[in-house]
């Protein structure tokens, strides 16, 4: 995609100081700017780069005063940083939504339907009785089992597997290799030491504006639904077990794991590698530190937990600082014992 | 799939109280029952829902006495709960095994063979000299490298990768995105600081009735075989390294990892995120807690380990409860030192 | 692949004692040797197996003297162990590089190119403007987004997803199910508690001789590049976040996770399940133990860290050994308090 500086200035409500017909097709860091790229200058620390950059254009704030000559073209906007961010988001949205049509070979069962301006990549598979909204992008190698529903504007990246009966909201994004709706891990121990699989006949529901990371797994419910609520953001390689409920706008970082039937409140932040046992409830606005284990329900909202079996962060840090010198502590006891 | 109440009563050895020709195609929770669904009532706590449910039918026990009028049709069986479980398992088995035939495009090398009543989904790939049993279901996007063997009734879900020379038993189920038989992580350090790959020419063997979770990885042996024995159940995102042996009926929960050449006994339970170092042996019937690290062989069967470097659960809990108040402990020492 | 003993002796600079025209097609352990296989005898502990093995041939060292009769054919080389290793590597390299050609159906956009002696498996997908070197093997179900570059001799296994703009060096190997170049996890919190995605427009660069394990994920940079430098070896299910830099010849074991913008030095060893927070630097030659958390930059090279919040291994082991008996420590304090 190529744009003239004039087009970009119009998008940003700014002014070009120079030739409006110059074209750019790339966003560059100012210190690495090259012809065809557009950069921005917001932090004055980076000003020296302006005088040397080879970027075709640089976005600056209205009140910027150059102290030396330069060869790039300026676009003046109210605020350079937010101008650049607007550009970035427009560019990103544009690239992601530009794909339209069907690449062959790909398969969609005749009983399934897709809204307008959608995309189906080569080797994508859509089972029976699926209902897919408008502007949905289904990339190469994605798999949708039977009766999957997907809302408008959702992006399903390459190699994502969405198993039968899953319901995906609108404006979601599911990154490569994620698995949605695999069987929950339920086995009933038998008298002879073997296990018998407990049928997992529920489904997974992702509400609107949910993001799921690469190679993350979300298991279907035994009965009923595993639910990830509106606006929740899940990173890569997270495991979400059967019948879990994740609250609105909760963020879960990479490699965390939530065990079966646990319910996480809204606006929680769960850091990387944290582990939460099954069948508990975590209150709204809870923060759970990296690699923290949580084995009991958290009833009071707004706490920060940390540690192998998570407790309040402040207490954890005190204990851990002593733990690092337990040796010294023991010596002090020995000393006391001697004198005793 | 649609069944008449008469057919279901026959399957369950029960009796329909009402029209045997009514049809159902879905299992519902009694409190969420809708026309076309069948529910069960076992726990008397849920009895009030019977009088309001819109499910077409409800399974109840022989001796159930209704205290109010209701509009659903009853199926009376010896025990409502186990009747429903039977139905659930039949339904699940039926849905999983009903797929038969070949979806195109898909590829199977001419030197490979598949037993009767099998299924190959679109975009599935079967390499050279594979031998696949009867009733095997190979879903869309599954990959079988050369010389893979698979026993009867095994289900390979969408996007599973089974690398060359793997041997999979009968009645196994491998969930989406799992990788079986990838190269073990073996690199020999060289004098100049670089590493040289050690060829991994062994394979993976899964015995019968093994279940492998979504996005789990099982590496092939350097030489010989990585073996997962009969009846073992492995959850999602578990890592099983080269030359590991997992004993019969051992259960491993999500995100656990077993390092190279370690041998786990039978009937063990390994909880989520547990990590076990390489080249050790874990005795039969060992329980390893969530996020527990195990760095030494466990020789005595039947222990329960817990903690960062796992030791007996009871001891761990004692230590950890003191750790949570190490601060208080230190103060007591200070107090003693002052008085001293 | 089948070779005569004469061909193998020539490769190893050794001599066949018997019929040079016998053929082998497999490497066997000496204790499991069968006709058609070749084994080696290096450790004298295994000598008894020589007299019973059914392997067609056994590689022995020049100075080996048999003490009993045997039926296999010997190949004498300077050093049996390194001879066998040479054979193993040749065999491995040969099997991996032997695939040439294009399996159908597969797609490569007309604007993309591939060097000579390459392989593209069935259902592989290559986007627009990709440049792929010579002898590159792209297995079934692999996905390359637009503008991906790959150097010579690199192997992309089944189901690997390489997202747009990634740059992969030569002699790399990426194992099944790995995802390279998925979006980084960047969301800006909004005043109403929701999150807004921060566009991730950077890319991923893997330099030469890099290995990436099965189902590992490497996120693209927000801007700029996530870089894995020459010779680094990454195991299965590792998570590498946006803008991370991994130094040359650094080794990272399974299920470890590196958070955003962290820079790991060269020749480091990071054990399984270790977690490293974002925005820090780890000095060269650092060793980080299994399941260790690192929350601060490590400035001095050559240290070994261990523990929940990693510190020097020796100190950790001291503290942990006391922790395991904290109970005893507390009793000693009680004792002192009583006497006090």
Image (cartoon, coloured by chain):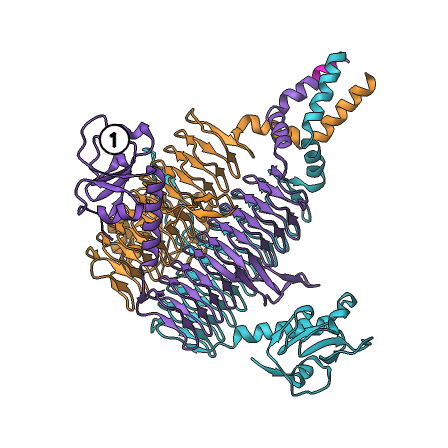
Chain colours: A cyan, B orange, C purple
- In this view, A120 is above or below B5: below
- In this view, C213 is above or below A316: below
Judge whether residue B193 is colored magenta: no
Left or right: residue A49 versus residue C226 is right
Left or right: residue A137 versus residue B55 is right
- Residue C206 percent coordinates (x, y): 52, 59
Q: Quadrant of the C terminus of chain B?
A: top right
Left or right: residue B88 versus residue A179 is left
Q: Chain of mark 1?
A: C
Q: Is A198 or C312 nearer to us in this picture?
A: C312
Tell me if residue A244 can be seen. no
Which residue is pictured at 36% across the width and 40% down the height? C82
- Residue B247 percent coordinates (x, y): 35, 35
Q: Is B61 or C278 nearer to us in this picture?
A: C278
| Picture mark count | 1
- Residue A137 percent coordinates (x, y): 47, 71
Q: Is A86 or A301 nearer to us in this picture?
A: A86
Element at label 1: helix
- The answer to which quarter of the image holds residue A275 is top right
- In this view, A129 is above or below B208: below
Which residue is pictured at 54% across the width and 26% down the height? B314
Q: Quadrant of the N terminus of chain B?
A: bottom left
- Residue B105 percent coordinates (x, y): 29, 69
According to the picture, the residue beneath numbered tag 1 turns out to be: C49
- Which stretch did the figure color magenta? C334-338
Q: Main secondary structure of the magenta part?
A: helix
The crowd level at tag 1 (other Cα within 10 Å; few <14, some 14-19, many 20+) is some
Tell me if residue B168 can be seen. yes
Q: Is A37 or B126 nearer to us in this picture?
A: A37
């Amino acid at each position: 995609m190529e744009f003239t500086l004039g087009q970009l200035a119009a998008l940003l409500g700014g002014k070009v100081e120079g030739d409006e017909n110059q074209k750019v097709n790339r966003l560059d860091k100012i210190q690495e700017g090259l012809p065809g790229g557009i950069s921005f200058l917001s932090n004055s620390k980076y000003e020296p780069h302006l005088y040397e950059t080879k970027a075709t254009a640089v976005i600056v704030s209205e009140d910027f005063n150059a102290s030396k000559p330069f060869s790039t073209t300026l676009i003046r906007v109210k605020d350079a940083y937010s101008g650049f961010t607007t550009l970035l988001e427009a560019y990103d949205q544009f690239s992601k939504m530009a794909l339209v049509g069907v690449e062959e070979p790909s398969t969609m069962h005749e009983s399934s339907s897709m809204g307008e301006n959608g995309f189906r990549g080569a080797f994508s598979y859509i089972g029976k009785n699926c209902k897919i909204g408008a502007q949905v992008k289904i990339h190469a190698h994605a798999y949708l089992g039977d009766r999957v529903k997907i809302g408008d504007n959702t992006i399903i990246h390459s190699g994502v597997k969405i198993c039968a009966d899953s319901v995906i909201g609108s404006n979601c994004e599911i990154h490569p290799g994620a698995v949605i709706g695999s069987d929950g891990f339920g086995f009933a121990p038998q008298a002879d030491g073997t296990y018998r699989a407990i049928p997992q006949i529920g489904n997974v529901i992702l509400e609107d504006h949910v993001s799921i990371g690469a190679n993350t797994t979300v298991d279907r419910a035994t009965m009923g639904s595993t639910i990830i609520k509106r606006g929740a953001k899940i990173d890569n390689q997270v495991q979400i077990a059967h019948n879990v409920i994740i609250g609105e706008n909760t963020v879960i970082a990479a490699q965390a794991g939530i065990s079966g039937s646990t319910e996480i409140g809204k606006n929680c932040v769960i850091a990387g590698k944290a582990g939460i046992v099954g069948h508990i409830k975590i209150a709204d606005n809870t923060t759970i530190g990296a690699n923290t284990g949580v084995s009991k329900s958290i009833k009071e909202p707004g706490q920060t937990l940390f540690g192998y079996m998570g407790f309040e962060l402040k207490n954890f840090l005190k204990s851990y600082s002593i733990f690092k010198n337990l040796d010294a502590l023991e010596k002090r006891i020995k000393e006391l014992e001697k004198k005793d």
